[in-house]
Image (cartoon, rainbow, N blue to C red):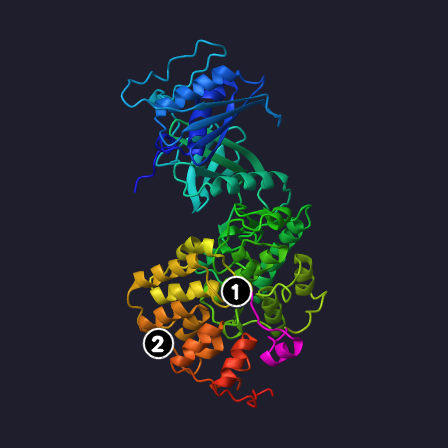
Amino acid sequence: MTQPTIRELAKQGDPQAIAILFNHALKPKGITTTASRLEDILSLIVEADPTPDREAIATAIHKGLTKLEVRSIRKVRLLGRQTGQQTPAWEREFILEIPEDETLEPLSERLQEPPKLDLSIEHEEEEAQTPKDGMHGVGDVVRDRYRILEQIGRGSNGITYKAEDLQTKELVAIKALSLRNMGDWKQIELFEREAKILEQLNHPAIPRYLDYFQIDTPEDRAFYIVQQLAEGQNLAKLVENGWRTNEKGVRKIAIQVLEILTYLHDLKPPVIHRDIKPHNLIYGNDGKIFLVDFGAVQDTYRSTMARGSTVVGTFGYMAPEQFQGQSVPATDLYALGATLLFLLTHRSPAELPQERLRYSFRSKVQISDNFANWLQKIVEPDLEDRFHSAKEALGTLRGRIAIGNKLRKPLSWKALVGMGVATVVIGSIINAYKWDILIRVFHTDNPLTSFCMMIEGLGYKALPKMDEKTRRLMKEYINGIGYFGYSVYEGYTSNTSCISESGDREIIQLLIDKKIDFDKDKSLFFARSIDTAKLLIEKGADVNAKANDGSTPLHVAKSLDIAKLLIEKGADVNAKANDG
């Protein structure tokens, strides 16, 4: 489907698009605007030095909106101030009424009162610098300085080009983001934040920041970040092309990345990359590693204050806390560990078998026990069990620090009773409003695999009671699939976990109605709510089933209420696991 133009978005009342068009006309006069909208009220902040004339601005804005025929806006609020000042010099409001039948006065007509503002949105075609197909082709010269040589990367937050700086004759990397091709306004914030952070960094393994600018045209706005070019190939491409390494090589890569992370995390405030993965690590011919793509970067102050921030990262390399929109320095450590597993196994960490959210990788790799223990600790799903800092992980890898205490075993229901704990509720990995991200991130050709991967996010730490929005969206997804069949997703004990982990009776019943096969001997081990347990027992689940370690559902009951239900239904309170 064709993306709407900036003009079309502005006509629909989009405040960002309106501001872009006004800025295109006013910026040559030294005047800039920012816009926001609440229902049918448009608010515009107009800045200039000196303060812009109130009536001239009001007349120009009114004519511009009238020419665009922005019918969804009823009232316009203007606030004028001097550039760089927070206190407004004046305010102005007017009602926007678009004539239905009159011939609209051309916008190109200049205002009579000073300053004369040309708000014409119609410009000659040759003036436009619209990139080809939304961005650039080989040979294009950007900003009369950077000649595009080739496209070297494309992601959700921009396209990266290799280019030549015509002034310095150096090779550079240019990351470009087109507003016209953008799917989410949040991308602008991430892009601008990336530029701001890069400008502050100074590390030999992080390509040097060179420039940031934007180019406005009547139909688009394009944003650009220019950096030193990191020569080499990313680790993902190397592995795809058959490159292999061993424990020694992986250790060398780990040490280099940990040194970079130590630098980033020691900054004030600490900088968290949030998207460490093979694609973002460039391997030079001399074995030197460069860390690139700071598009997901976050500082800890913002991460702490903005709990509802957008979930960013790459599935398979994201730590559990990242699905909540929360990141800490140890989040980057988890992603590094997942990257190292990829280098050793040549497969995405998401494809590795798991046990209680922990990667079971030891049988898949040929490494020393010491390094395996280190890897296990850096990818621990629980922050308390993971390395707390890059310094700690680096010191341990170099043998200067001993690996900490053994991992804690999950508490049994008996221990919980002794502690007086009535229920156990582990926090949700993904909030309901993140569902659209889940659908996109976890989509595969196998519908059951997609669902199981979503349960990976919603399941092990699912809400015991889904909110109505989550329930509705999940039902729509399941009903839209039709018949799931009996396929099994690798890494799960059986489809049972997918059924049980959803934690909602209505959803589980719907899945069972879709003929999903579930193991009656294992289903209760995954039940996360009392309603789930009741339904599974009704469907024939065995309350005294034994796992490989001899444990029963009673040993791993997720709450006291579930434990009581199991006992009522005949669970053996004297049953013992193999370890006693």
In the rendered structure, which segment of residues is drawn in magenta? 408-426
* Residue 569 image point, x, y percent: 47, 85
Residue 422 among those drawn in magenta:
yes
Which image quadrant: the N terminus?
A: top left
Q: Is residue 492 visible?
A: no
Query: Looking at numbered disc 2 in the image, what kind of residue is underneath it?
Result: Asp
**Real-space Cα separation, disc 1 to disc 2, in angstroms:** 31 Å
Residue located at (38% from left, 22% from top): 121
Q: Position of residue 139 (x, y in %)?
A: 39, 33
Question: Regarding mark 1 in the picture, which secondary structure is present there?
Answer: helix
On residue 75, the disc is none
Q: Which residue is more in the foreground, 367 or 221?
A: 221
Along the line of sight, the residue nearer the viewer: 529 or 48: 529
The answer to whether any part of residue 217 appears in the image is: yes
**Considering depth in this image, is 123 or 31 the residue closer to the camera?**
31
- Label 2, on which residue? 517
Q: Is residue 322 above or below residue 106?
A: below
User: What secondary structure is found at the residue carrying circle 2?
Assistant: loop
Q: Eyeballing the image, is 341 above or below 290? A: below
Q: Earlier in the sequence, mark 1 or mark 2?
A: 1
Displayed quadrant of residue 137: top left
Q: Is residue 551 left or right of residue 304?
A: left
| Left-right relation of 105 to 89 | left
Other-residue count near label 2 (Cα within 10 Å), few / some / many at <14 / 14–19 / ≥20: some
On whether residue 314 falls in the magenta region, the answer is no
Q: Residue at x 63, y 55 (%)?
A: 329
